[in-house]
Amino acid sequence: MNTPLLTTHDLSIGYPTQQRTVAQGLTLSLAAGQLVCLLGPNGAGKSTLMRTLAGLQTPLAGTVKLAGQPLTDISTLDLARRMSLVLAERVDMGTMRVGELVALGRAPHTGRFGRLTAIDQARIEQALTLTNTHRLADRRLHQLSDGERQTVMLARALAQDTDLILLDEPTAHLDLPNRVEMMRLLRQLTRQTGKAILLSTHELDLALQAADTLWLFDALGQLAVGAPEDLVLTGAFDAAFDKAGFYFDRSTGTFTMQPDENGPSVRLSGNESLLFWTRRALRREGFAIQDTADRTVEAFFQQGQAHWQYTYAGQTYTVTSVSDLLGALRDDLSEVRK
Amino acid sequence: MNTADTHPSGPPSAWSWRRLVVPVLTGLALFCFLLDIALGSVAIPVKEVARIVFGQTSDNEAWLYIVQKIRLPKAVTAVIVGCGLSVSGLQMQALFRNPLAGPSELGITAGAGLGVALVMLGSGGSASLYAIRQLGIGDSWLLVAMASAGSALVLALVLAIAGRLRDNVVLLIVGVMVGTVTLAIISIWQYFSQPEQLQEYLLWTFGSLGGVVQTHLYVLAGVVAGGLLLAFTLSKSLNVLLLGDNYARSMGLNVPRSRLLILLSTSVLTGSITAFCGPIGFVGIAVPHLTRSLLDTADHRLLIPTACLVGTLLLLGCDILSQLPGTQAILPINIVTSLLGGPVVIWIIMRRNSIRTAF
């Protein structure tokens, strides 16, 4: 077991001027080589915790320690050599080039005038290689897409060569392929470099797949810690995102819109590979899936062709697409309403 | 660092001609320096001018006097003003992370004017060209100190307000407002002044490179050299501050201390120059942009020395134009810099399409 790099003891976070405590009693630890995702609904305190851990905001009570040393005892320069940040704020400097930006990451290691040594150059090269951003080095920042921009900000943090990297919502504003790529990259970095990485994110399904550990805030500021799968099985996810209208489906690990309780219900059976998508279609259409329902749908393959057999009130229809199945169900329901 | 050092894969054609920027600018600046001295109501051959400037001798006593006592101090003042205001603007644009920041745009020169006015009030005179020329070397230090303090006061005020703003253009409006209030305070004092003092004050507001006598030149040169040196030692901090306060702090920068030193350097540069030469507009905002587009970099270690060259060239050029070649008339320098500088700023904003990327 690794010795923890970042620890907090009985930490309270919030805003003293507004007399608002966001969360309290937080005792957390983050070990080298770990990817930790901080999750929670909007306003639960993710950003406040990130800012406090980064030393940008003072805790209301308790301590944050980096390798056993309280954050308040570490000088700004020393801290910069041990912890780097990627912030959610957008940096606007049109004429700066990516190469210059990444080289700025060496600032805590260089002298008064920032002259780069061979070691600095090597670290910059390494950061560009790890993030696969060599091809962007001559581009200006304003020429980059949002995904590229976040990646080069990460490259800058890597050039800073710290044991710990904190990222505040690095996947916000990114499209799906870029979000997946960013998470894959972060996970790969923890494995390749042994760095500890903490990121806050809204990407539940990506966090479930990529994180070693989740820190999960609920709406009341309670923090649950554990392996993603444990948090799913103990119901912490349901509690954290408890809201009317949808629920967390433990079997699929996704949030699903809650069907209307007074709506129609269907009994579903048949071939396993067809069931998943049939279930989704039926739920979207507003049907609850219940074993006691008097409408039945059976999905099966016949001569390599998918079939759905729908039975209700003694009548049976057989269709060969989900679209036709939903059409038949709709016709039936409108008959009943008349 | 140079962009080419960090990634040798860069396009070679894009930077080979940029290597020539500094030598060409230096040559042009030297040429304009001599031309500026050669031109004037009395025609003196350029060859003679070069002999007097570099050899300190000439057969013609009148030429020797004109060059040594009048034209050389004026040209040296142009160089000092060009360097000082340009670097002042460069620092302000990094400090505010705003391409529209500049000493005259954010009311800093107005603050210096307030300092000048206070000195004159205290000594019972008026803030006039005449009064400034009569000051002894001790008083001129007091003038520089008060003008710098006035600049620092306004700069700190605008900086405090800027902390609550996100919008570049709104900051400009705040700067104009703070400048207006400062000028209004000066106007109150003007209102109770004698008409001849008012006339002198108006002349001061036009700006003049010729009003700096030799003893004051030493003071001005020393103070501006100090300010430039301080700015250059801050170039790494300026680079890191481009990423914003939070990033700068996470990269080990002592942000409050750096801000204070930048504020000090900017105020001293703007204050001392404004005290002796009057408010000279647009140099501080235009030169940083010209320098950035020439060098194509955001690195202040290169930008600061190059901005000095560009500023020198611009001021000498403006001074040559202000003498209205072929006539005896001399235009106030502030009018010339505004006529040239204003369109330059508009051109830059238009060309970059958006001021968010003009930086």
Image (cartoon, coloured by chain):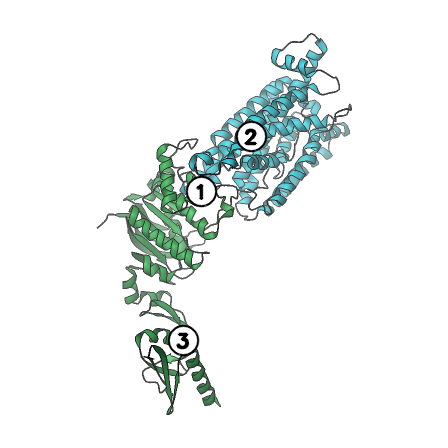
Image depth: mark 1 or mark 3 in front? 1
For this rendering, which residue is in front, A241 or B308?
B308
Helix or strand or loop: what does disc 3 sit on?
Answer: helix
Q: Distance between the residues labelled 1 and 3?
A: 46 Å
Circle 2: residue type: Val
Q: Residue at x 73, y 20 (%)?
A: B40
For this rendering, which residue is in front, A56 or B89?
B89
Q: Name the residue under label 2.
A: B21
Circle 3: residue type: Ala
Numbered tag placed on residue A121 in the rendering: none
Residues marked 1 and 2 touching at CB (< 8 Å): no
Q: Residues within 10 Å of mark 3 (few under 14, many from 20)?
A: some
Q: Colour of chain B?
A: cyan
Q: Chain A is drawn in which colour?
A: green
Q: Which residue is drawn at 43% across and 54% down?
A: A19
Helix or strand or loop: what does disc 1 sit on?
Answer: loop
Where's residue A330, x and y in %? 45, 83
Where's residue A155, x and y in %? 40, 45
Tell me which corner region of the image, top left, top right, bottom left or bottom right, holds residue B68: top right
Q: Mark 1 points at which residue?
A: A137
| Left or right side of B53 for A33 | left
Q: Mark 3 points at which residue?
A: A281
Residue lying farthest to the left in this orientation: A1
For this rendering, which residue is in front, B63 or A138?
A138
Where's residue A169, x and y in %? 41, 54
